[in-house]
Image (tube, rainbow, N blue to C red):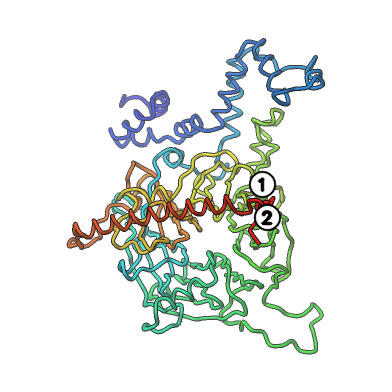
Amino acid sequence: MDRLPDEVIVQIISFLDIIDIVNLQRTSSRYLALARDNAIWKLICFDHSRSEALRRRQHQLQIQDPRLAELRNTWAALPGPNPTAWDVSQLVGSEQPRAAVDPDAEARVLRTRALANWEPGYPTERLDHYDEFIARHAPVNIGWLNLPGTKDDFKEATGLAVLHDPASTHAVSPLSDGSISVFDLSARTTHHPNGGGGRLLAHSAPGLLTGLPLTAAAEHHHAIMTSTGAVESVSINSSSRRGFFAVQQHLHEVDLTTLQLVSSKEYSFPITALSSVSDDMPLVVGTSNTLHLYDARDPTYLPPPSSGELIGGRISSHAMLEEPGPLSILHTSSDEIYVSGRFKSLLSYDLRSFPRLRGTIFTGAPIACLASLPYPFIPRSLDLLRNPGTSIAALQSARAAPGTTLMAAGSYKGKGSLELYGIPSHQSYQNRQTASSSKLFSVASHGGRIVFSDGDGNLKWVERDAFSSIRTFNINDALAGSQSTTTQPDRSTPRGIWNSTTDQAPGQGDIVQKILPSSPPSTSPSHSDRPDTAQQNLLLYTGDGRLGVLGFGAEGRNPLGEDLWHDAVEEQVSTEQRAREDAERSFGETMRRALERSAEEVRFVRGLGMGYGGPLR
C-alpha cells in the first residue's frame, strides 16, 4: 500500500464505509490527509442528502413495470377520494409518463444532475466537506458560558458580538449590571488542545454602560440595560479593538483592551439596531425613527436650519424613517446598506449618497434579522430536479456570476418566513410554508448551510436553497440535558420564570435571539498550528440572557473543551443542598404543569356560548 500513488489509494478509499475511512485516518499522517480528501467527503455528503434521496426515489419509480407506473400515475392524478365523472373523463386518453428504456443510463444522468443541483459551494469558495459531514450528521452539543457572579447575584447577557484577532476569537457581551465581559473562544489547535475554553478574560466594573454608581440597586441597572429590548446592540471593530454599545438613547464607545469608556453620544430616540463596523465600513446607528452614520466628531442634535438653503438641498447627517422600528442593519461588500424591521420592506441606502433612500425591496413581512452570502442568488427556475429542461451549464454559469444573496428571517401571518434576495438582480425566494410554525429571530450562513432560529427554541439547518431541510435541534433539549451542556451549574447565572438556574429548570422554553459564527470564513490557519476538526461553532444569545457555544462531535463532547480553568478547590454541594434543590425543581415542574393545564382550560372555555372564540367582554 505504501508504494501505491495517492490517486490509487484515494480511489480505494472511496469504496470503504464511513467508519473504516475514519479509522484509517489514525494509522499515519499520509492516510490522514488522503482519508480526508475533499472529493470523497463531498460524495458522502451528497449520498446522505435530501437531493440524492429524491433522486433514488425517482429512479425506483422509473424502473417499475410500465403498467404499474401508468396505474400509479393515474391514481395520483385523481383530484380527491371521490372523483366525479368529469374528473375521470379528463384522464382518459391522457399521456402517462413511461418507464425508463435504459434505467442504468438514466440513473447516471439523474445522479449527475442531482449532484450538480445539490452542490452547496461556489466556484470561488473553499468548503471542507469532511467538516460539512460532521456538521450535518454528528451529535449537537452546547456549552454554556459562565457569566461572572454568584448564584444569589446572577446577571444576564444583554447582547453579543465577536472580537476576531489573528490568533484568537473573543466573545464580548454587555451584562445586565452595566458591565462588559470578554470570553476566550479560541479554537482548539495542535499547540493548544483545549482552545480558549470559554474562559472569562476580562470583566469591567458594574455601571460602566449605565452610568449609575456602584451602590445602585441591581434592578436599576437591569431596567436600563433591557428597556429597549434591542438584540443588535453591540458592534465590534476588531482592528481598532473598539466596541460600540447601545443603551437606551446612548451609544458608548469602549476600548476593549482596557475596558474603559472612550466616548458617549446621545441620540434623539432609543437605539434599536447597530450595523457591523470596520476600518472600511462606518457604523450605522438605527434609532426608532432615524438612521445615522456614526462620527464621534459630529453633534447628534442639529441646530435649527438657517433661512437660506443650499442649491442641492438642506444638509442632513441622518435619514428619517417613514415607519418606525429598524431591527437589523446590514453592510454588503459594496457601499450599500440594507435596513429591515417592523416595516414590510427592505430599505436600501448608498453610503456615497446617504441619507438619500436608494430604493426598497417589498417583502410583505416584518424582517427581524438580515445576513448576507457573498455569492449570487440561484433562482428556482435553475433547479435541475424540478425543471428537467434546465441544463447543468446554465446552473454553473449562474453560480460563477458576481452577486450577493441577502438572507432574511422574519414572520408572515404568524408563521416563520425565510427569504432570499439576489443583489443586484432583486430576484427572490420566500419560504413561508415549511420554514417554521413560529416567528424566526435570527439567520446566518454556516459553512455550506443556512441556519436560523425560531420562536419554539429550534435551530434549523437548511441547504442554501432555503427549502431543503438538513437537521433540527431544540436548545431546550440541551438545557434539559446532563452535565455535558453545562460546565458549572452553581454559577449558571440566567434564570427561568421559576427563578431557577439553567440545570434546575429543564425545558423552560428559551429561544435563540442571535446566531453568530465563531470564526470568520476567511480564516486560514497556519500549517504549524493545525486546528482541530469540526470547529465551525456557533455563538448563541438566548432570550433568557444565556451565552452558549454550539458545536458538533461525539455525544456529550463539550464545545468549550475540558474545564481545566476551574479552581482545584471548588465549592462542594452538600447532600442536603442537593436534596433541597431537587425538591425545589420538582415543585416548580409540578406548578408549571398545573398552570399549563389551567391555561388550556381557560382557552377552551373562552367564548363558549357566545358563538365565537374571541375574548369575553
In this view of the protein, can residue 383 be seen by the observer? yes
Query: Secondary structure under badge 1?
Result: strand
User: Relative to the observer, which residue lies in front, 206 or 240?
Assistant: 206
Quadrant the N terminus occupies: top left
Left or right of residue 425, residue 566 in this image: left
The correct choice, above or below, for 179 with respect to 378 in the image is below
User: Residue 365 got which mark?
Assistant: 2
Under mark 2, the amino acid is: Ala
**x and y percentages locating residue 215 in the rendered image:** 36, 84
Residue at screen point 41% across, 51% down: 507
Left or right of residue 17, residue 286 in this image: right
Name the residue tied to disc 1. Answer: 430
Quadrant the C terminus occupies: bottom right
Residue found at the very far bottom of the displayed protein: 307
Residue at screen point 58% across, 15% down: 104
Decide which of tag 2 and tag 1 comes sooner along the chain.
2
Q: Are marks 2 and 1 in contact (CB under 8 Å)?
A: yes
User: Relative to the observer, which residue lies in front, 353 or 609?
Assistant: 609
Q: On the image, which quarter does residue 111 sit in?
A: top right
Q: How many marks?
A: 2
Residue found at the very far left of the displayed protein: 569
Query: Secondary structure under badge 2?
Result: loop
Q: CA distance from mark 2 to mark 1?
A: 10 Å
**x and y percentages locating residue 388 in the rendered image:** 69, 28
